[in-house]
Image (cartoon, rainbow, N blue to C red):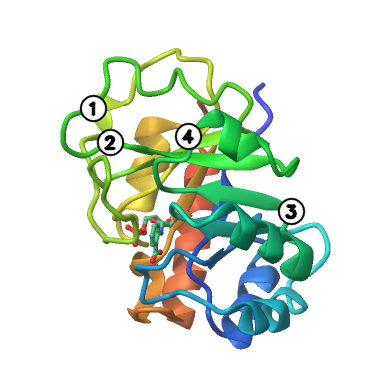
Amino acid sequence: MNASAHTRIKFCGMTRADDIALACELGVDAIGLVFAQRSSRRLDIEQARALRDVVADGIDVVALFMDNEAAYVQRVIDEVRPTLLQFHGSEDEAFSEAFGVPYLKAVAMGGDVATDPLSRHARAVALLLDSHAAGGAGGTGHRFDWSRIPHDSGRAFLLAGGLHPDNVFEAVNTVHPWGVDVSSGIESAPGEKDTAKMRRFVQEVRRADSLPR
Ligand SMILES: O=C(O)c1ccccc1N[C@@H]1O[C@H](COP(=O)(O)O)[C@@H](O)[C@H]1O
């Protein structure tokens, strides 16, 4: 008999302490704090430090960047102490690895997709497949065509883009990702997470995990 799956869950774009406390209670694996310039969920370092202190031990704190300057990334590392970095822009492998902190790399699955989208950033902990086109930002609430995900790449990936409580069961059951990442699908307004949606999202992932594979 197969041991039941554990799909990792990352709640991204967290801006409120109460939302983070509930996410930890619900047993998510990672909390995302956004430092991308163009995001409505962007935090300054002081806000992020305060929120970081709410995250329970053992849950990853992910600092999300999108073409931020190296000096700024380093400041966030020093002051916020993320356990993972997430690069959502045009950061190359040399840039992403230079900080010595494990990282996730976003891959654009909207627009023209490279023939082998999962082949780069071999040392990333996982790739994050999101629905934006190359050069675009994430957190859009749109999903991409999951049939574009190459089979048998051997890479761990997080599925992102347009996930919400009503489609995440189907997503996990169809794609079998290493993890799922959600921002707008559990919100009532940008950055403001919705208690009921957070709860139901986790329940639906665990329901999919309980099915035989
Ligand atoms: O969340 C943002 O504001 C953001 C800004 C810039 C780059 C990435 C961003 N978020 C990431 O996008 C995915 C998908 O978001 P959604 O669930 O479709 O709203 C999200 O999980 C973040 O990792």
Mark 1: which secondary structure? loop
User: Which residue carries the number 4 mark?
Assistant: 177
- Going from N to C along the chain, the mark reached first, 3 or 4, is 3
- The span from disc 4 to disc 2 (Cα, nearest Å) is 15 Å
Residue at the spot 74% in from the left edge and 79% down from the top edge: 54
User: Which residue carries the number 1 mark?
Assistant: 113
| Residue 74 falls in image quadrant | bottom right
Against 55, residue 115 (above or below) is: above
- Going from N to C along the chain, the mark reached first, 4 or 2, is 2
| Residue 149 falls in image quadrant | top left
User: Which residue carries the number 3 mark?
Assistant: 83
As rendered, which of 115 and 179 lies closer to the eye? 115
Image quarter in which the N terminus is found? top right
Mark 3: which secondary structure? loop
x, y (%) of residue 68? Answer: 49, 57
- Disc number for residue 109: 2
Give the residue type that dot 1 points to: Val
Residue at the spot 62% in from the left edge and 84% down from the top edge: 47
Against 206, residue 77 (above or below) is: below
- Going from N to C along the chain, the mark reached first, 1 or 3, is 3
Contact flag, marks 2 and 1 (Cβ < 8 Å): yes
x, y (%) of residue 109? Answer: 28, 36
Give the residue type that dot 3 points to: Thr
- The span from disc 1 to disc 4 (Cα, nearest Å) is 19 Å
